[in-house]
């Protein structure tokens, strides 16, 4: 069977860490402060610049505070959950692997009782009408493992009583986030920016800061999650004084990505690239009979994490489905045409293609022919 004659220039289509931005060069990391303290004058300057560039590129309001956290978006979300929840009832929207993890932490670790799970299956979004604005809300903006995303946040009222806590790790830098609707937002460097892993960002609205300074949870808070001291927010944390030691190599890499984002036109350019990328795959799926979106409709389909179901595998045992997908992935990997295109182990058997702003549209166009070829070759061998 003939294989495509052209390969993607960058075959990295995994959803985190994602492909590096176009023009990325390892030599540029020579400016990083390796072997230096992050608490040195130069170290603090770089961390403050990273926070300032994050605010600038993502158009975050000046009265919102931004901190660099340990443990990627997971650490940032956990810090918010441990520090802020417990005052009000909590609504948790679950529709993918990671939103389910936040529900488990809230119920089994924090052991909160007044919790309502607003559930949806993979490919669907929860019913937003079930959300009570008097409650705190924990939700994921983009379902990385289910291929769906909220198209907007119009359903969150401005006069809400509770806080909104959003895991935006696969949405940040891929969509325009409505900051007036988000009180706590967490994301990582390794998704939309293509940065290195292990570091997260925590963005707090004035409402979230007021909660932090007026409410103390009944449980002890691990030091790595503490955002206050003596009932006052730790201001230096939001000026680059991190709670732990960050990798200055990773900091430099993230700075490179943010500077690239500014050069190409900031958030409007990033979201445009993301939309154009996702259209390539979604238009191809529409004319490919053996493939479907996991999302139940294009209106809620993710613009960055594209989850695809192989129709001809439906009804077969799950092991057989996963074996087929892994065989496709193996062929693509052997030919260095695509890496990491199988969805998360805990997601339904499916393919997953990252189409964030660091991916080139032409590479996705070439990828479609390789996916087609890999499918036909594996099917012929069954």
Image: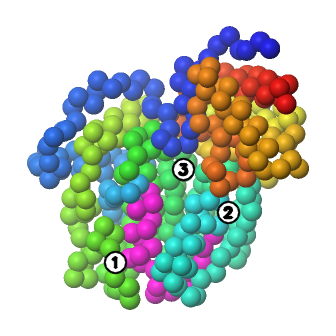
Q: In the shown orientation, is residue 151 left or right of residue 257?
A: right
Image quarter (top left, top right, bottom left or bottom right) of the N terminus: top right
Q: In the shown orientation, is residue 278 left or right of residue 70?
A: right
Q: Which residue is mark 3?
A: 170
Q: Which mark is residue 95?
A: 2
Question: In the image shown, does 372 or 22 lie closer to the viewer?
Answer: 372
Instruction: Estimate the x, y position of residue 64 in percent, counting from the top left.
Output: 36, 63
Instruction: Estimate the x, y position of residue 110 in percent, counting from the top left.
Output: 47, 80
Whether 278 is among the magenta residues is no
Q: Which residue is mark 1?
A: 221
Image quarter (top left, top right, bottom left or bottom right) of the C terminus: top right
Mark-to-mark CA distance, 1 and 3: 27 Å
Seen at 27% across and 51% down, the residue is: 246
Q: Secondary structure at mark 2?
A: loop
Between discs 1 and 3, the one toward the N terminus:
3
| Dot 1 crowding, Cα within 10 Å, few <14, some 14–19, many 20+ | some
Query: With respect to residue 240, does 164 lie above or below?
Result: below
Seen at 31% across and 81% down, the residue is: 213
From which residue to which does the magenta span run?
A: 73-93
Seen at 46% across and 85% down, the residue is: 86
Query: With respect to residue 379, does 111 lie above or below?
Result: below
**Comparing marks 1 and 3, which lies closer to the viewer?**
1
């Amino acid at each position: 069977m003939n294989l495509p004659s052209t390969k993607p220039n960058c075959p990295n289509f995994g959803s985190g860490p994602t492909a590096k931005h176009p023009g990325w060069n390892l030599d540029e990391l020579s400016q990083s402060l390796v072997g230096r303290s992050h608490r040195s004058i130069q170290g603090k300057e770089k961390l403050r610049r990273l926070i300032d560039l994050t605010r600038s590129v993502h158009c975050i309001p000046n009265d919102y505070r931004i901190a660099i956290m340990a443990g990627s978006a997971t650490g940032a979300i956990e810090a918010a959950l441990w520090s802020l929840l417990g005052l009000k009832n909590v609504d948790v929207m679950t529709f993918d692997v990671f939103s389910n993890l936040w529900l488990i932490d809230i119920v089994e670790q924090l052991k909160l009782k007044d919790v309502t799970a607003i559930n949806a299956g993979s490919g669907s979004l929860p019913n937003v009408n079930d959300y009570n604005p008097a409650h705190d809300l924990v939700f994921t903006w983009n379902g990385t493992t289910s291929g769906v995303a909220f198209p907007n946040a119009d359903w969150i009222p401005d006069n809400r009583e509770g806080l909104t806590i959003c895991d935006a790790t696969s949405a940040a830098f891929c969509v325009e986030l409505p900051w007036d609707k988000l009180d706590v937002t967490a994301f990582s460097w390794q998704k939309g920016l293509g940065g290195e892993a292990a570091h997260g960002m925590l963005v707090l609205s004035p409402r979230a800061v007021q909660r932090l300074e007026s409410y103390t949870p009944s449980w002890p808070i691990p030091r790595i999650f503490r955002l206050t001291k003596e009932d006052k927010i730790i201001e230096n944390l939001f000026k680059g004084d991190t709670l732990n030691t960050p990798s200055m190599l990773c900091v430099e890499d993230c700075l490179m990505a943010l500077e690239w984002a500014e050069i190409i036109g900031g958030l409007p350019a990033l979201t445009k690239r993301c939309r154009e990328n996702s259209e390539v795959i979604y238009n191809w799926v529409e004319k490919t009979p053996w493939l479907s979106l996991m999302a139940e409709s294009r209106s809620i389909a993710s613009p960055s994490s594209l989850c695809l179901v192989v129709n001809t595998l439906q009804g077969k045992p799950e092991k057989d489905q996963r074996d087929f997908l892994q065989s496709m992935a193996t062929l693509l990997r052997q030919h260095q045409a695509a890496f990491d295109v199988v969805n998360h182990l805990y997601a339904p058997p499916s393919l997953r293609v990252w189409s964030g702003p660091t991916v080139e549209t032409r590479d996705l166009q070439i990828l479609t022919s390789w996916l087609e070829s890999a499918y036909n070759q594996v099917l012929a061998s069954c």
